[in-house]
Amino acid sequence: MTRAPRAVTIVGASLAGLNAAEALRREGFDGPVTLIGAESRLPYDRPPLSKQVLAGDWAPERAALTDPEELAEDGIEARLGVRATALDMAARELTLHTGETVEFDGLVIATGARCRTMPGTEGIGGVHVLRSLDDCLALRADFEATPRRVVVVGAGFIGAEVAATARGRGLDVTMVEALPTPLSRVLGDEMGEVCAEVHRDHGVDLRTAVGVERISGDGRVERVTLSDGSTVDADVVVVGIGVVPNTGWLEGSGLEVDDGVVCDASCLAADRVAAAGDVARWPNELFGETMRVEHWDNAAQQGAHAARRLLDAAVGPFTPVPWFWSDQYDRKIQLAGRVRGDDEVRVVAGSVEERRFAAIYGRAGRIVGVLGFNRPRHVMRYRALIEQRAGFDEALAAEF
Amino acid sequence: MRIVVDFDLCESNAVCMQIAPDIFEVRDDDFLYILDETPGEADRARVEECVQRCPKQAISIAED
Ligand SMILES: Cc1cc2nc3c(=O)[nH]c(=O)nc-3n(C[C@H](O)[C@H](O)[C@H](O)COP(=O)(O)OP(=O)(O)OC[C@H]3O[C@@H](n4cnc5c(N)ncnc54)[C@H](O)[C@@H]3O)c2cc1C
Ligand code: SF4
């Protein structure tokens, strides 16, 4: 029989892990709570890393999610700069990179994700990825060191935000995207094209349907060679080609890993073991679909849900409508739901021309998503309809 | 309980409005309006959910 844990260890001291720790205390759990984090910093917020901090508008400290006093008050112990390297489910023991082993009773896996890198670029100065605050500060330093030409590889949301921030700093930006239309797999061709236009209007040289063949330079990056044979001069390159979940340390643990830690609908991966955030894959019963979500809101909510589930077997499935925002130039883009490139798309508020609109996505008679450009109110209204499993016709008829 | 929003932090993403539309409203001018600054105790759980879920940590509760 399963029981509630007497102590909870959380691996990964970021958004999902911290929310799990705080939720344990909110629920009245009074056993030991330990956060183990590979980064040497206290948990901080990542969204500002491609926005305010990278722009130079915020000091890095402003991204902090907590401080030592708050953690002490909540009785949360943080072991930072410590990486878990193995998990032994039989012995219920973690191995740390120091060689030390620590027993656990309850466990939350919240190790997030890391950036995919481009092979062959190691050791070339000026080539960046962006995931951590250290990454952000290194990139910011390069932006400040009188570069002129920035190449962003990948026009996904992170790449797009970096491009926008670099333009805001007055840098020349070329963005290279393998798809014919950026984000078309996520937003469909029509809305992906709107995003592309926004960048072009802001002076980004957007190259689509072309890959990166090679990034080269003598010690430091000098140019990027594209698959059509053309070359782009570059002082700084930012590679934004997606992330992979941090599950390497779970190899041999017996936990099922398949592009993320596989959980049940309630976020449980094994007896008294839950997972949350970018690293977790679970069946979201609202959509009848197994998913892994790489958004802020999901990490925060799933962390809290995982904690509640560990404490109480009656806590049911985790069924959120995934939602995220992305700030680019003066546009606040928000997407809620699970949309695909081939969904039916209808603009329901404002107009695409003025770049201030809401569009809803329908599939099999249901509303499955909403995209907003500076329309937060509409996004949240339609998000509620998605949650209620409303019909597409019903959503089209709604007035907000 | 009194609701305090730090409008320097708020980015009008309407998360709070989805949880408690009778208390928070983001209008078409893109600004957040607090419809009820001093809700009753019956609303505490929902307001606390807003505090926790606000991505900008812009909402707090003052007990006065
Ligand atoms: C630059 C940037 C901008 C973003 N902007 C937005 C946005 O605008 N909107 C939005 O919705 N989302 C955004 N996101 C996504 C959002 O930040 C993530 O979804 C969120 O950080 C996921 O939280 P997490 O706790 O699951 O994982 P992470 O934040 O990835 O944290 C995992 C932590 O675990 C640690 N760790 C990994 N392996 C181990 C180990 N073996 N032992 C110990 N510790 C380990 C890592 O070092 C890390 O600190 C952005 C992300 C980035 C990088
Ligand atoms: S959730 Fe926070 S940031 Fe969003 S509108 Fe409400 S107060 Fe503002």
Image: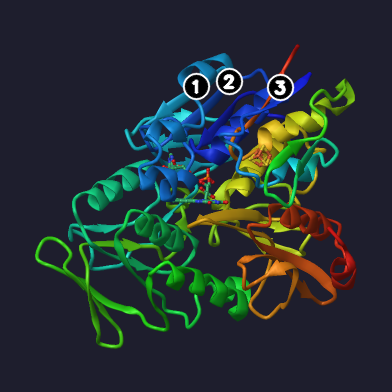
Q: Secondary structure at mark 2?
A: loop
**Discs 2/3, front:** 3
Disc 1: which residue: A77
Question: What's the residue type where badge 2 is placed?
Answer: Pro
- Residue drawn at (60%, 43%), measured in percent from left and top? B11
Mark 2–mark 3 Cα distance, whole angstroms, equals: 28 Å
**Discs 1/2, front:** 1
Judge: label 3 CB < 8 Å from ligand 2: no
Q: Mark 1 — on which chain does it sit?
A: A
Task: Examine the rendered structure and indicate whether residue A145 appears above or below residue A83.
Answer: below
Question: What's the residue type where badge 3 is placed?
Answer: Ile
Rate crowding at label 2 as few (under 14), some (14 to 19) or many (20 or more) other CA atoms within 10 Å.
few
Give the label on residue A32, or none.
Answer: 2
Residues tagged 1 and 2 counted as in contact (Cβ below 8 A)? yes
Between A32 and A338, which is closer to the camera in this rendering?
A338
- Residue drawn at (78%, 46%), measured in percent from left and top? B18
Q: Quadrant of residue A348?
A: bottom right
Q: Mark 3 — on which chain does it sit?
A: B
Give the label on residue B61, or none.
Answer: 3
Residues tagged 2 and 3 counted as in contact (Cβ below 8 A)? no
Q: Secondary structure at mark 1?
A: strand
Does residue A81 appear anywhere in the picture? yes
Residues tagged 3 and 1 counted as in contact (Cβ below 8 A)? no
Mark 1–mark 2 Cα distance, whole angstroms, equals: 8 Å
